[in-house]
Amino acid sequence: MRHPLLALALMLAACAPAAPPAAQAQVANGIEVRDAWAAPTPGGVDVAAGYLTIVNRGREADRLVAIESARAARVEVHEMSMDGAVMRMRPLAGLDIPAGGQAMLRPSGNHLMFIDITQPFVAGETIPVRLQFERAGAVEVQLPVRRGASHGH
């Protein structure tokens, strides 16, 4: 090549690790679920965290009322907050998603809590989850397990 800097840039680009693929949005019954993922868990731990964004494409507000997964005895939405230097978590009875709006479940905020998991979540696998909404009904989603900023877990 005539330009050594261009050759170096091309070589570095070819050797750079690929970014993990973005999870595709999953849409059903006017509900879109995007950016879904779960954090890997070490052996011996019986809880896991999951994250996603729920977008309500409908004209009426909806409410997430229940969550199920074959990989856990139960799944809850947990609210995380800081009380001084103490992290507090508590389950929420449901999660409102306004019409045309969204609810984000993310590290260091509201998140899915998988309780009594059947086996550790391993990077590279997917976790099946069924979200039950008051209006939209059941929405099946897959949460890819990957490393991320899983603060608080």
Image: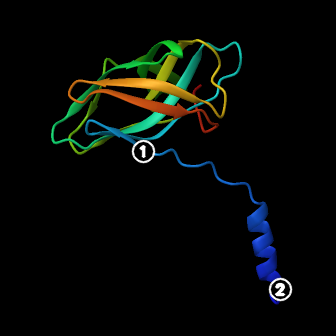
Tell me: residue 62, above or below residue 117. Answer: below
Tell me: residue 103, above or below residue 73. Answer: below
Which residue sits at x=52%, y=24%? 87
Report which residue position mark 2 lands on: 1
Outermost residue on the left side: it is: 60
The amino acid beneath tag 2 is Met
Describe residue 59's horizontal placement relative to residue 120 as left or right.
left
The mark found on residue 25 in the picture is 1
Number of other residues with Cα within 10 Å of mark 1, as a class: few under 14, some 14 to 19, many 20 or more: some
Give how far apart the Cα atoms at labels 1 and 2 are.
Answer: 41 Å
- Where residue 147 sits, quadrant-wise, is top right
Colour scheme: rainbow
Residue 129 pos. (x, y %): 45, 25
Number of other residues with Cα within 10 Å of mark 2, as a class: few under 14, some 14 to 19, many 20 or more: few
Q: Nearer the viewer, residue 29 or 85?
A: 29
Describe residue 148's horizontal placement relative to residue 98 as left or right.
right
Q: Nearer the viewer, residue 125 or 107?
A: 125
- Element type where label 1 sits in the image: loop
